[in-house]
Image (tube, rainbow, N blue to C red):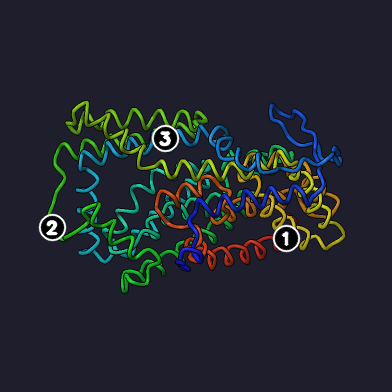
Amino acid sequence: MNWDKLKSPNTFLLIFLLIILTAMMTYLLPGGEYQFIESGGRKIVDPQSYQAVPGNPQGIGAILKAPIRGFIAAAQIIGFVLLVGGAFSVLQKTETIDVAIRVLANAHQHSPLIRKAIIPVFMIIFSLAGAVFGMSEEVIPFVLLFIPLALALGYDTVTGVAIPFVGAAAGFASAFINPFTLGVAQGIAQLPPLSGFGYRFFCWTLTTGLAILYVNRYALKIKNDPQKSITFEQDQKRKQKLHIENMNSELSLDVRHKTVLVIFTLSMFALVAGVMLDQWYINEIAALFVATGIIVGIVGRLSVDEITGGFIQGAKDLMGTAFVIALARGILIIAQDGKIIGTILHGLSSIITGVHPVMAAQLMFVVQMLINFFIPSGSGQAALTIPIMAPLSDLLGVSRQTAVLAFQFGDGFSNLIIPTSAVTMGVLALAEIPWEKWVKWILPLEILFIILSLVLLIPPFFINW
């Protein structure tokens, strides 16, 4: 028997085991539901409407149906991932990315300033994206870029994932503008838009700084000793596949490559503008990447067969990611059908009462983290929990701003590790990093984020924030 396989099950098995575990919980927990009401054009939970209902245990049939139902429920994000993968495959065929990475790798080798600044600068950019327009699913295409870049610079796959993913997550959790989490939560809590900006910006600075220190320290360790990487063997194979060899070769971008890069850069600016100014979401962003793939293929002098073949190959390479996303969504479906989410929320919220306001705020943060396991959607979690937490905070002497901050921290930081997040599991599947290896790497940072969150929830009580 191969005990190594038993000790390290693959991601698909882990998620399927969680589906089974969630189904078992539907037998152990009583059923409970909240009713939803319309408010400001959005469905939010009625905090006074909780009632016990007959349980709906999920058996073997429900477990086996969860993957296909997960595919149906997550069809939009799965389609997005496949189309983005196709667009990047076309971009890869133009060889522009290969040349650009080699040029940057040479600059990185010869410039001490670039060596010191490259990780902090990129992580600040992604953190701002998370804080300003809620970068989440949008981070997936950048993982495709930063993994080969990190390998070319002497780092590893984990670093390539962490720069965009951890950077965006740090900004998302401590957002000071994000309309999809902060905006929704403040609206439900009846707070002015963008109120509390100063303290939130302070929180963003600390969380982003902590994320940069953690990733940069790890990257330097790998630079000095690549064998310390949790993906060392995988990285050697990936370097061969991506032809990341002899990065000291002198290459320059020709006119064709520069034109492709300009088009790609303009498309990224269009993505940011569309999200911020016109509330673009997955459909619009996917359309942008389809258009970008076609245009860079034409400008890159690819044939029709090469462009279409690129889209097909790129989508094919991400089918494993699609399966992971579908399975992760299946966990939520089992919990919803089993009618245990309302029960869990009601039970958790009841433990907050009767404690000091500072501890109450910290317990709110813990509750939000636990709820996020089942509802890994910022706006969805806000609609479910803020109608309960906001009036509860009034009774406990906790400001509504603080209740919203506890929601942000609980929703955002746990997204980095929970296996029910379609984005998290999709990113890991894309990078071919087993979830249990990622947990081992991210757990120290997750603990630091939790400690920082608990500390940052103390001052608001004393400054009447």
Residue occupying the point 16% across, 45% down? 253
- Nearest the viewer among 340 and 161 is 340
Residue, disc 3: 271
Q: Is residue 461 left or right of residue 200?
A: right
- Nearest the viewer among 258 and 221 is 221
What amino acid does circle 3 point to?
Leu
2 vs 3, front mark: 2
Residue 286 screen position, x and y as percent: 42, 31
Q: Earlier in the sequence, mark 3 or mark 1?
A: 3
Q: Earlier in the sequence, mark 2 or mark 3?
A: 2
What amino acid does circle 1 point to?
Gln
Crowd around label 2: few <14 · some 14–19 · many ≥20 (10 Å): few
Residue, disc 2: 249
- What's the distance in space between the residues labelled 2 and 3, CA to CA? 33 Å
What amino acid does circle 2 point to?
Ser
Q: Is residue 454 left or right of residue 13?
A: right
Question: Is 283 situated above or below 7?
Answer: above
Q: Earlier in the sequence, mark 2 or mark 1?
A: 2
Residue, disc 1: 362
